[in-house]
Image (cartoon, rainbow, N blue to C red):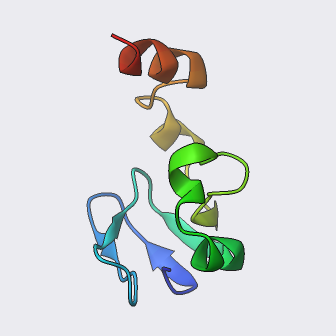
Amino acid sequence: MPPKGLVGWGRAAGAGAAAADIHSPVSGMVAEVSRALEEKLESINHSAERQGWICKLKNFRADDLEPLMTEDEYAAFTTH
């Protein structure tokens, strides 16, 4: 899991014992990390928005979210 602190767009946050770094699409501060995910890693594939979230960010710029897909856009993109 990423440590609390600054993450940046295009920069990897150290994921500790995870198999890969975590890349954030926005810059901000990691305010909270999911301890539940450490216990049940597979939940990221089945319930990423609810049980499988990685971390919560604060102090990010709202306009950094503009180029990202909405939930509906992502669902349409992944079903084709």
Is any part of residue 58 visible from this angle? no
Residue at 28% from the left image edge and 73% from the top image edge: 20
* Image quadrant in which you'd find residue 72: top right
Closest to the observer, 68 or 48? 48
Q: In x, y percent, where is residue 47? A: 64, 46
Q: Is residue 46 above or below residue 32?
A: above
Q: In x, y percent, where is residue 58? A: 66, 64
Q: Is residue 80 above or below residue 10?
A: above
Q: In x, y percent, where is residue 28? A: 52, 65
Residue at 51% from the left image edge and 37% from the top image edge: 65
Q: Is residue 42 above or below residue 3?
A: above
Residue at 48% from the left image edge and 80% from the top image edge: 2
Is any part of residue 6 visible from this angle? yes
* Image quadrant in which you'd find residue 55: bottom right
Q: In x, y percent, where is residue 57? A: 62, 63
- Side of 21 relative to 40 (left or right): left
Q: Is residue 40 above or below residue 79?
A: below
Closest to the observer, 78 or 71? 78
- Side of 73 relative to 59 (left or right): left
Q: Quadrant where the C terminus lies?
A: top left
How many marks are shown on the rendered structure?
Answer: 0
Residue at 60% from the left image edge and 57% from the top image edge: 43
Closest to the observer, 48 or 68? 48
